[in-house]
């Protein structure tokens, strides 16, 4: 574990990071290696172009949204801490977590995962998924294969199905409710980040 | 010629087996000069009265008996469900076995030889329909999510069971007092391998009635299907070796290789036939009537082909069903889909019934050799090894699972490991050279009885007692579909960021491959370009629209057809000028493309539709009668041809009466879109053709918002409503149009 320790010592505030996200040292090291591989110019920060260089992300219909999620509003770069914090959302949920109301919600709980997904829909951050935002998502997922009318019908249907308070938009609670039958802990976890 | 053969045999007496009524048929005293074998030349000599009535049982004996058995089985099944309390307490499989015992006893009393469950009959005729039904309707998503766990249970669990039981039984036989010292290790291991496999038929029969949550159901059920490969290999292996007597390391190694060959070979054979079936279905648009046959025949051929090579027939059937389903369903008509579903359910139901009855009969019939110690030990060891196996394996598996298996899940998985007719048939197949054959058969039957009766009957109260999670009924939700797909993309992207080639990456790759290459070849027409989300959405809308017209709420069909017209893929040509032709085409196109994501939990033997579909149907009937009355009092509303509302306005139609029947959330709404003149000229021409009629305008925004669309007269509506509610017999050409029978 010598190399692990030496890598760990390069990262500032690594203890705090591990505490906050729940990653083990081995994971931190792995993520750090990945971070360095992406950071071609060795600036210690990632820019959108670095993300764009990942081929799989470029092909992804919502790739740009995912990239956007890494950057806090107003920031142009992502440092290692933010990188890890975002990825911590996808850690498999811990089995036994004492329900301590005073402690903040851990970043990989079901609610946090859902919130992360919700924020990807809600680009203007007003707490609701409006019809226009939904249409954008549908458009990017379905690419060119459908007509505009089809998209609009689907969007209307979706909102009408989920919208309980009739405000013509989907709030976080409504979003959560529509996904109550899906096993989010399973669906939104990447195994190797355990 | 057959007439004369009849006359000859008419002189013997006939006994109806099972009823025990000998009937002496008076043979027509037809004298024939000359030899016994002469045919037509003996007409002239003595003229007796022409035999008006003659009995000849031998002629129809075999089919008659088969039909009688099946009829008896089904009447029994009918009987159970008429007795109110019985079917709630006792699972059907138990009752059927009891009936079998009674019938067997009856036959024995009469003095006839009761028919034993012939292994040939079982493996070639009775088992395939059940497995095909299971495989075709296998819920893919939970299966693939848990495939690792299922495989571990199926392979390692079965191996553990076989060796544990075989070994301990051998140890038992070594004890002098048991009196079985002649049994060698290989025979015991053979026995162990037969008894160790969880049986899909029994599992299906019992689990269907307890509605357990999806995870546990798929675990036990998947295990019962996939352990066939292991059973086949072990069985053949030990059978071969017990003839020879010794086992070398090479043999063991070959056995392992054989396992992979058997399982992967079976899957490969099944997949090949599956692709063939999918490809064939691409061309069946002109011969809709025989579409279901292709599905059945290709699957059966897959089974037989793999059995021919001693590969795992069950895995071939499952693979065939799974592979062909998405493509076939995109190609076949609505009616064919229903036919396939219906026939599979019917055959598998009959098969299952017959299997259990025959088990009962065979118990009475079969040669038995009872040895208390051996049999009791077998039963106990079965339970013990199953429990130990499940606990041990879960401990290991949970380290790799994201969602762990709880103790309750483990208990149900262990307790639900039922043995059934496959074990019996394999035992029956043992050649008579095994001196322990009768003993083994007796022990197998006892184990089967124990698991089916004791475990089958008590599992339901135990599930209640332990408050195990039950299956949640859920309506298909477009939200879930969209969000799930979104999350799939999200996870694939995040995996990309991490540089991790995981689960989602490969799934994405497979989907892409499927879309670009495979679908192009296997799906007819232009439909292969259609994204799944669209198909799912269209199917939902269609179902709703149908329900609404049937219940009489939609005063006309045109609005929904216009909106459906907008939903069509661009590729389908819109040609006709005549209104009926237009509607016909639209409905036909929509109906052909609606089954892809039908979330039918169709692995229920007793219902053809989901519980919620049945509820919907009954609610539809209720509303229908209500609406009939209301309709008589209301007039049709038309929106004037020069539309006042702006183009993108989507009109929401709510029916006030529905709030009394549905809850507000679940009420389906149909959107009527106004087609804009430039974009869909055909739609506009449609409007213009219909003569404008003046009618009452109602308040669209009000609670009775019954906004309809343009120019549909009452006559047309009634005609269409009649069509829609009664898919009568169709001309052959329009076989795929249930709606255009009028």
Image (tube, coloured by chain):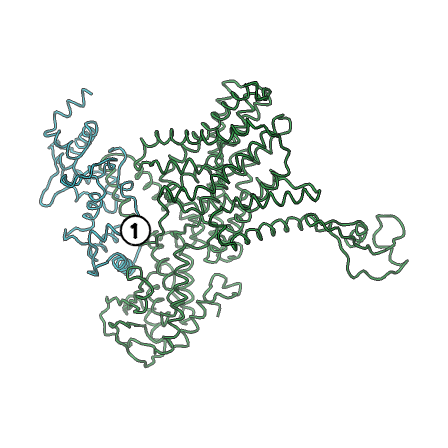
Tell which residue pokes out farthest to the bottom in this image. B694
Is residue B274 placed above or below B1 in the rendered structure? above
Q: In this view, does B99 lie to the left or right of B85?
A: right
Q: In this view, does B383 lie to the left or right of A78?
A: right
Is residue A30 placed above or below B211 in the rendered structure? above
Q: Is mark 1 on a helix, strand or loop?
A: helix
The percent position of residue A99, horizontal first and vertical second, equals 20, 39
Q: Which of B24 and B228 is in front in this view?
A: B24
Picture residue at 35% right of the left edge, 43% below the top: B467
The tint chain B carries is green
Label total for image: 1
The percent position of residue B25, horizontal first and vertical second, equals 79, 54
The percent position of residue A129, horizontal first and vertical second, equals 20, 54
The tint chain A carries is cyan
The percent position of residue B608, horizontal first and vertical second, equals 46, 54
Q: In this view, does B29 lie to the left or right of A4?
A: right
How busy is the neighbourhood of tag 1: few (under 14 within 10 Å), some, or many (20 plus)? some
Is residue B227 placed above or below B718 in the rendered structure? above
Location of the C terminus of chain A by quadrant is: top left
Chain letter, disc 1 residue: B
Picture residue at 12% right of the left edge, 38% below the top: A78
Q: Nearer the viewer, residue B394 or A69?
A: B394
Residue where numbered disc 1 is placed? B480
Location of the N terminus of chain A by quadrant is: top left
């Amino acid at each position: 574990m010598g190399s692990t320790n030496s890598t760990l010592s390069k990262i500032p505030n690594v203890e705090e990071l591990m505490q906050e996200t729940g990653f083990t040292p081995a994971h931190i090291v792995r993520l750090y290696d990945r971070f360095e591989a992406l950071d071609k110019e060795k600036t210690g920060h990632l820019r959108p172009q670095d993300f764009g260089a990942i081929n799989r992300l470029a092909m992804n219909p919502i790739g740009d949204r995912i990239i956007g999620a890494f950057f806090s509003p107003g920031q142009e770069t992502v440092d290692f801490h933010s990188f890890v914090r975002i990825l911590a959302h996808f850690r498999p949920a811990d089995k036994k977590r004492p329900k301590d109301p005073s402690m903040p919600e851990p970043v990989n709980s079901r609610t946090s995962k859902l919130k992360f997904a919700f924020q990807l829909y809600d680009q203007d951050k007003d707490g609701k998924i409006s019809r226009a935002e939904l249409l954008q998502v549908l458009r990017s997922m379905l690419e060119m294969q459908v007509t505009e009318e089809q998209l609009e019908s689907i969007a209307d249907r979706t909102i009408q199905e989920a919208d309980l308070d009739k405000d013509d938009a989907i709030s976080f609670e409504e979003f959560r409710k529509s996904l109550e039958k899906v096993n989010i802990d399973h669906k939104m976890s990447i195994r190797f980040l355990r | 010629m057959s007439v004369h053969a009849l006359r000859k045999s008419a002189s013997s007496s006939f006994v109806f087996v099972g009823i025990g009524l000998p009937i002496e048929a008076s043979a027509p005293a037809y004298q024939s000069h000359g030899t016994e074998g002469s045919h037509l030349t003996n007409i002239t000599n003595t003229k007796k009265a022409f035999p008006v009535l003659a009995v000849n049982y031998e002629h129809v004996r075999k089919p008659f008996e088969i039909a009688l058995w099946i009829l008896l089985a089904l009447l029994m099944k009918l009987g159970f469900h008429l007795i109110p309390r019985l079917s709630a307490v006792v699972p059907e499989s138990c009752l059927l076995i009891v009936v079998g015992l009674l019938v067997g006893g009856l036959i024995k009393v009469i003095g006839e030889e009761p028919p034993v469950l012939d292994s040939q009959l079982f493996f070639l005729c009775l088992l395939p329909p059940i497995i095909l039904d299971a495989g075709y309707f296998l819920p893919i998503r939970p299966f693939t999510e848990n495939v690792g766990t299922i495989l571990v249970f199926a392979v390692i669990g079965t191996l553990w069971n076989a060796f544990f039981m075989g070994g301990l039984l051998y140890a038992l036989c070594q004890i002098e007092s048991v009196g079985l010292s002649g049994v060698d290790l290989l025979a015991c291991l053979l026995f162990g391998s037969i008894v160790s496999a969880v049986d899909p038929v029994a599992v299906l029969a019992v689990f269907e009635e307890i509605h357990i949550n999806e995870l546990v159901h798929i675990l036990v059920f998947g295990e019962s299907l996939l352990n066939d490969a292991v059973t086949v290999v072990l069985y053949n292996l030990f059978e071969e070796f017990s003839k020879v007597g010794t086992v070398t390391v090479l043999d063991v190694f070959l056995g392992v290789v054989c396992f992979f060959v058997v399982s992967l070979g079976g899957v490969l054979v099944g997949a090949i036939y599956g692709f063939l079936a999918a490809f064939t279905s691409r061309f069946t648009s002109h011969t809709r009537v025989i579409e279901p046959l292709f599905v059945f025949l290709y699957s059966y051929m897959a089974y037989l082909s793999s059995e021919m090579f001693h590969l795992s027939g069950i895995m071939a059937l499952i693979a065939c069903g799974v592979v062909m389903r998405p493509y076939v369903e995109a190609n076949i008509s609505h009616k064919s889909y229903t036919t396939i579903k219906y026939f599979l359910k019917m055959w598998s139901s009959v098969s299952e019934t017959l299997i259990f009855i025959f088990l009962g009969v065979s118990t009475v019939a079969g040669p038995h050799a009872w040895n208390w110690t051996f049999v009791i030990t077998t039963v106990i060891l079965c339970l013990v090894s199953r429990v130990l196996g499940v606990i041990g394996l879960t401990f290991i598996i949970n380290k790799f699972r994201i969602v762990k298996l709880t103790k309750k899940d483990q208990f149900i998985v262990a307790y639900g490991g039922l043995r059934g007719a496959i074990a019996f048939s394999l035992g029956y197949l043992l050649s008579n050279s095994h001196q322990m054959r009768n003993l083994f058969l007796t022990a197998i039957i006892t184990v089967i009885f124990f698991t089916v009766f004791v475990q089958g009957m008590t599992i339901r109260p135990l599930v209640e007692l332990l408050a195990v999670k039950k299956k949640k009924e859920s309506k298909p939700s477009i939200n879930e579909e969209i969000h799930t797909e979104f999350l799939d993309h999200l996870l694939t992207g995040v995996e990309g960021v991490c540089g991790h080639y995981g689960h989602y990456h490969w799934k994405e790759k497979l989907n892409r491959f499927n879309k670009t290459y495979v679908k192009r070849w296997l799906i007819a027409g232009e439909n292969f370009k259609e994204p799944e989300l669209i198909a799912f959405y269209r199917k939902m809308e269609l179902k709703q629209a149908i329900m609404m017209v049937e219940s009489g709420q939609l005063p006309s069909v045109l609005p929904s057809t216009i909106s459906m017209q907008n939903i069509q893929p661009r590729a389908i040509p819109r040609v006709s000028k005549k209104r009926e032709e237009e509607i016909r085409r639209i409905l036909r196109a929509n109906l052909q493309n609606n089954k892809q994501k039908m979330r039918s939990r169709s692995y229920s033997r007793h219902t053809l539709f989901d519980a919620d579909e049945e509820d919907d149907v009954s609610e539809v009937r209720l509303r229908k009668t209500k609406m009939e009355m209301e309709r008589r009092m209301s007039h049709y509303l038309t929106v004037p041809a020069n539309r006042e509302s702006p183009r993108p306005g989507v009109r929401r139609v709510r029916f006030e009466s529905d709030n009394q029947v549905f809850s507000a959330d679940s009420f389906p709404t149909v959107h009527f879109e106004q087609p804009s003149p430039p974009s869909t000229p055909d739609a506009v021409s449609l409007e213009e053709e219909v003569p404008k009629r003046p009618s009452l305008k109602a308040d669209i925004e009000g609670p009775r918002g019954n906004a309809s669309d343009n120019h549909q007269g009452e006559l047309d509506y009634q005609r269409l409503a009649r069509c829609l509610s009664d898919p009568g017999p169709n001309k052959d050409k329009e076989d795929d149009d249930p709606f255009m029978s009028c």
